[in-house]
Image: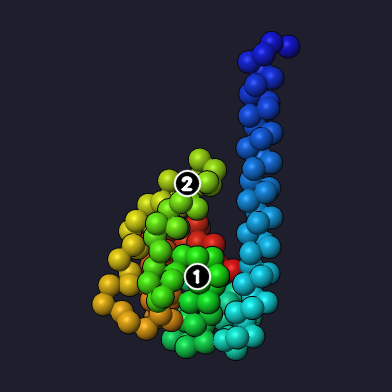
Amino acid sequence: MGLLPIAIILSVALRQTSSVIIMARQELTSKLVRSKCQPETGVSTEAIEGVPEGKFPDDRNLKCYMKCAMTMTLTMRDGKLRTDIALSMAEKLSADIKDRVIAAIQKCSSADDGLTDPCEVAFTATKCIHDADSEILFFP
């Protein structure tokens, strides 16, 4: 077997390993966020689990859960979106999804314009990302 087939096999294996690591990190992040933010906000599990399905009820607890989650993941600070942080995180994603995530972040970078309530900012940004590309929304 020549070096090229070995390099291709290694590349595929590394990409799969990288995807597994990213998924494990997302699962851990979800657990950490839920363990802190759900009791803090009183949001129901049903409301949290509805978001990836496109369910965005006018629920103050859910909105503040989103703020808590974004604060924990450093994508919000002092009630403002941190698109710079979100973009730097997106750069670390695998090539098959990175461009889609970056496009959604850029599209929604001004979702907080005119909003002063941090919970509303988080809700609007999360909904914007979902509406831009629902398949790439990571919602803990």
Query: Which residue is outermost to the right?
Result: 1
Looking at the image, which residue is at 52% across and 46% down?
Answer: 92
At mark 1, the secondary structure is helix
Q: Mark 2 points at which residue?
A: 91
Residue 102 visible within the image = yes
Q: Residue furthest toward the top? A: 2
Determine which of the numbered discs, if any, sits on residue 70 in the image: 1
Viewer-nearest residue: 74 or 24 = 74
Pick the residue in front: 107 or 76: 76
**Where's residue 67, x and y in %?**
48, 77
Q: Which residue is drawn at 65% across and 56% down?
A: 25
Labels 2 and 1: the sequence-earlier one = 1
- Mark 2 Cα shell of 10 Å, populated few (<14), some (14-19), many (≥20): some
Please tell me in which quadrant of the rendered image residue 34 appears.
bottom right
Residue that appears at 63% across and 23% down: 8
Looking at the rendered image, the quarter that the N terminus falls into is top right
Residue type beneath disc 2: Glu
